[in-house]
Amino acid sequence: MAGATPSGPRLRADARRNAEQIRAAAIGAFQGQGLTVPLEEVARAAGVSKATVFNRFGGRIGLIEAVIEEVVASELSAVIDRTRTIDDAGERITHYLTALRDLQYRQPAFNDVLLRTYPDSPGLMEICRVGGEANEEFVAAARASGALRPEFTAGDLQALVVDNALALRHGERPGRDDYDRRTRYLLDGIRGHSPAPGGC
């Protein structure tokens, strides 16, 4: 009948298309602005209503769960995996901390994860768990090698990246050159007294 409401396969195809459009819009918005971006912006970018976002994903937490792998988890996993390939413990912790701070600078959503902005998101909390275990692993190895100050702990590393998340989220964003210079200052401050590779 003309004008009848689509049903069956047509409706399912429309729903799938809407869901993919919302996912793509959410990934772009979360990567660019963080996980707190208004859902109205996501809906507008997807070409749907805010109600459709809720119908398809159940709200913000459901949307975060649907895209957190692409937005944050895959990049953090790549950082951890790359760090584990580095043989020297001092170079390993240097690479890890530098890469974490780079991810914080580029990805506002990563700072929302570090700040546990949405603790009801299992995916977000799983990233926190994985990151915490990596901190323990890399700090322990670097301390044992003398590459870090003996009193420096994984908790200290966590506090440093959380402080940085707060500064990037709520403070004035520094230029990239200044940001990288401060990363080097931070590394100099936590290194142990053993000679660095190359005698530096």
Image (tube, rainbow, N blue to C red):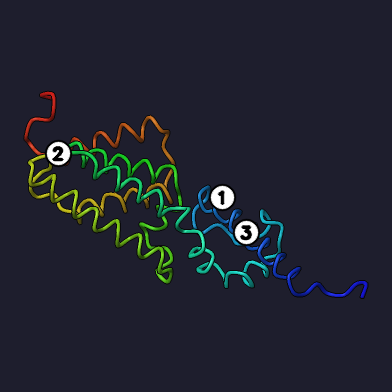
Q: Which residue is mark 2?
A: 191
The residue lying at 62 percent from left, 59 percent from top is: 20
The residue lying at 45 percent from left, 47 percent from top is: 107
Q: Secondary structure at mark 2?
A: loop
The residue lying at 30 percent from left, 47 percent from top is: 81
Q: Position of residue 10 (x, y in %)?
A: 76, 68
Quadrant for the N terminus in the image: bottom right
Q: Position of residue 184 (x, y in %)?
A: 26, 33
**Outermost residue, front direction?**
9
Which mark sits nearer the N-terminus, 2 or 3?
3
| Residue 170: mark in rendering | none
Which mark sits nearer the N-terminus, 3 or 1?
3
- Is 134 left or right of 73, judged from the image as shown? left
Depth-wise, is mark 2 or mark 1 nearer the camera? 1
Mark 3 → mark 1, Cα distance in angstroms: 12 Å
Depth-wise, is mark 3 or mark 1 nearer the camera? 3
| Residue 20: mark in rendering | 3
Q: Secondary structure at mark 1?
A: helix
Which mark sits nearer the N-terminus, 2 or 1?
1
- Is 194 left or right of 161, judged from the image as shown? left
Q: Are marks 2 and 1 in contact (CB under 8 Å)?
A: no
Label 3 is placed on what type of residue? Glu
Camera-side residue: 97 or 164?
Answer: 97
Packing grade of label 1 (10 A; few <14, some 14-19, many >=20) is some
Label 2 is placed on what type of residue? Arg
Mark 2 → mark 1, Cα distance in angstroms: 37 Å
Label 1 is placed on what type of residue? Gly
Q: Position of residue 156 (x, y in %)?
A: 20, 53
Q: Which residue is mark 1?
A: 28
Mark 2 → mark 3, Cα distance in angstroms: 46 Å
Depth-wise, is mark 2 or mark 3 nearer the camera? 3
